[in-house]
Image (spheres, grey):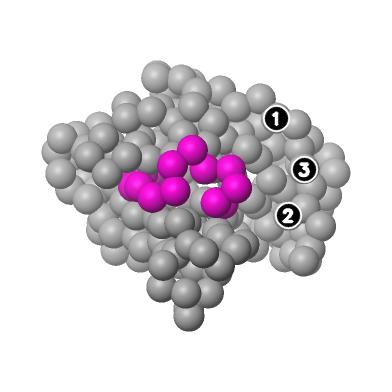
Amino acid sequence: MKRALQLLVLILMLRQTQLFCEYLKIADFDRGEKPNLISGDYGAWNRTEWDRTQFCSEDFTTDPQIVYAGRGCSLSLYYDVDSPSPPVYNGFWMRLERIDLTGWKYLSFFIKGDEEYGYTSSFEIQIKNIQGKLASFNIDGVTSDWQQIIIPLDEMNEKADFSETYEMLLVFDERYVTQKEGRIFIDEFYLYR
Ligand SMILES: [Ca+2]
């Protein structure tokens, strides 16, 4: 297993969109189909194919009561990490098409937990460069309202070379989730500087 950069980060969870000078929109899911806005594929991933008691699956929602900003589509992730066969983890991957993250200050996205199915309030974001180096960010405080999560990238860029970035991972790990089964919605992935 590749050694991950464990970074101490400040996660800002805000209810308003932050204003930045320059941005790159990576995904808004509004077309309801792949790829993302930088031609990168994405989808749910599972640790195993043989253990059907743990899984993650992705879908698009257009429900006006749920979808971010009340229009278009948001991505829906239904996860289950309740299994007798540890370790148990799964999640979502999105290719970043060798994008150069050097110089970008923040990765931002929006997230909301599903009131009906329940959800975990904590999970992990990983960013992997083309050499397989991982930077990990612990996210906490998810609620059933849409919130913006802003991940500072400065420390990651200082510690490793992210001039060619392979992918971003969202990880539901049985050891760290607050609820082992549920659904969350994500939307509006941006880079800012
Ligand atoms: Ca959207």
Dot label at residue 148: none
Screen quadrant of the C terminus: top right
Q: Nearer the viewer, residue 74 or 55?
A: 55
Q: Nearer the viewer, residue 160 or 12?
A: 12
Q: Nearer the viewer, residue 78 or 70?
A: 78
Residue 112 in view here: yes
Task: Read off the residue under disc 1.
Answer: 9
Between discs 1 and 2, the one toward the N terminus: 1
Callout 1 crowding tier (Cα within 10 Å): few <14, some 14–19, many ≥20: some
Dot label at residue 6: 3
The reply, left or right, for residue 128 in relation to residue 68 is right
Residue 108 in view here: no
Residue 78 x/y as whole percent:
34, 54
Residue 154, compared with residue 166, is above or below; it is: above
Residue 138 x/y as whole percent:
62, 38
Screen quadrant of the N terminus: bottom right
Residue found 48% across the figure and 62% down from its top: 83
Between discs 3 and 2, the one toward the N terminus: 3
Q: Is residue 64 magenta?
A: no
The kind of residue on which mark 3 rests is: Gln
Residue found 44% across the figure and 42% down from its top: 179
User: Is there a contact, CB below 8 Å, between mark 3 and mark 1?
Assistant: no
User: Is there a contact, CB below 8 Å, between mark 3 and mark 2?
Assistant: no
The kind of residue on which mark 2 rests is: Leu
Which quarter of the figure has residue 44?
A: bottom left
Task: Read off the residue under disc 2.
Answer: 134
Disc 3 to disc 2, C-alpha distance: 8 Å
The kind of residue on which mark 1 rests is: Val
Residue bounds of the magenta highlight: 173-188
The reply, left or right, for residue 116 in relation to residue 97 is left
Disc 1 to disc 2, C-alpha distance: 15 Å
Residue 3, compared with residue 107, is above or below; it is: below
